[in-house]
Image (spheres, rainbow, N blue to C red):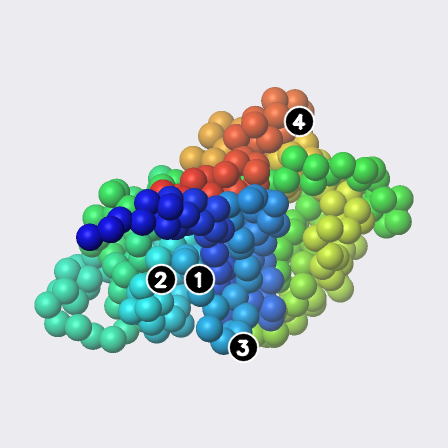
Amino acid sequence: MIINYKLIVLEVVMKKCSKILVGYFPAAPFFLIYGGGETQLMNPFHSLQNHSDLEVRLINLFEKDAKYDIIHFFGLHYSHYRAIKLAKAKGIIVVLSPISYATKKVLLGSIFHRVNRFFSFPTTQWLHRECLKLADFILPNSYEEFNYLESYFNLKLANRSRIVYNAISHDFFDNVNFEFRDKYKIDNYILCVGKIEPRKNQLLLAKLFENTEYKLVFVGAKMYDAAEYYEKFQEIINNSNNIIHIEEFPQSSPLFKSAYKSAKVHVLLGENETPGMVSIEAGVAGCNIVVHDCKPVREYFGNFAFYCKIQDNDSIINAVQNAFHSEKNPEFPAFLLSSYNWNKVAADYREVYKSLI
């Protein structure tokens, strides 16, 4: 048999020179509910555009015959199950960023999934577990999220996972001054950024601080599947002389970014934040931050944050007041920028993709 060494060398060189094609697949409905999960997808996507060994695309559902090497799914969502299963059947490597953490019913869930190993009930929890089982590699955004996924779904993930933290762009506040303060004539206020919905608890925060000495600013869009909640929230705003609400700005807008710069405190009362992009942004802007005492949040912010229990009104009030009357910590922004940045996230993703190929 004659061996064509030139052909073998050529094939090896072509393989090394060819780009790894990665498709980014968001949780539905991406364009209807843009938030932290979508931000976690788009920032690494932009950071990875200029690498010679990768081609990263946003999945186009109308594209035919795209030859993806890897599909990276964002969000542990039951609607992903069939797409993940089909990708695996086609020999495509599946990477999953779950963005999933809960504090309730972990023991109950663990028992359910132990039983479900032997008797398959096609519930949403079962579909979530199947997504985790099928994925070739999993990227939790905290060690606490990793522990939760293993405990709740009764799975061993250590040999196919890597912790990749959420982040912020180092230039996020470049060329941002005090546009918000100058336009709205307000300064040294308590800020809360986020879509207006029950899981963020803006209504509770508004009730606790309506008609007080504190100026309170909400920035966030109405969630149309939480219309009744939004109406109750607006009723508080309209009857209070110290609270304003502004519909969301584009995230790239200097007006939006400058809202952080003029605030003294940022409050996020979400129960299951991991940890909440807005808390990172607020901290980098120099705000004292008030957050619900949740394990992934503590993992990110350590002793820099002011913690409260959202089931305890006095705890929330005390945390906000302590944050407001405390000096800003000049070490906090530097800590965040050195610990969490999108270029590092993109580098971690690239390393994972190359190791899988």
Which residue, given by chain and number where applicable, does mark 2 sit on? 92
Which residue, given by chain and number where applicable, does mark 4 sit on? 328
Q: Residues within 10 Å of mark 1 (few under 14, many from 20)?
A: some
What residue type is disc 4 on? Answer: Lys
- What label sits on residue 68 in the rendered view? 1
- Can you give x and y, in whole percent of width and height, for residue 218 in the image? 69, 54
| SS for callout 3 | loop
**Cα separation between marks 1 and 3:** 14 Å
- In front of the other: 291 or 278: 278
- In front of the other: 77 or 316: 77
**Cα separation between marks 3 and 4:** 50 Å
| SS for callout 2 | loop
Q: Determine which quarter of the picture holds residue 221.
A: bottom right
- Foreground mark, 1 or 3, reads 1
Q: With 164 as the anchor, is 219 left or right in this view? A: right
Q: With 120 as the anchor, is 277 left or right in this view? A: right
What residue type is disc 1 on? Answer: Tyr
The tag earlier along the polypeptide, 2 or 3, is 3
- Foreground mark, 1 or 4, reads 1
The tag earlier along the polypeptide, 1 or 3, is 3
Residue 32 against residue 105 in the figure, above or below: below
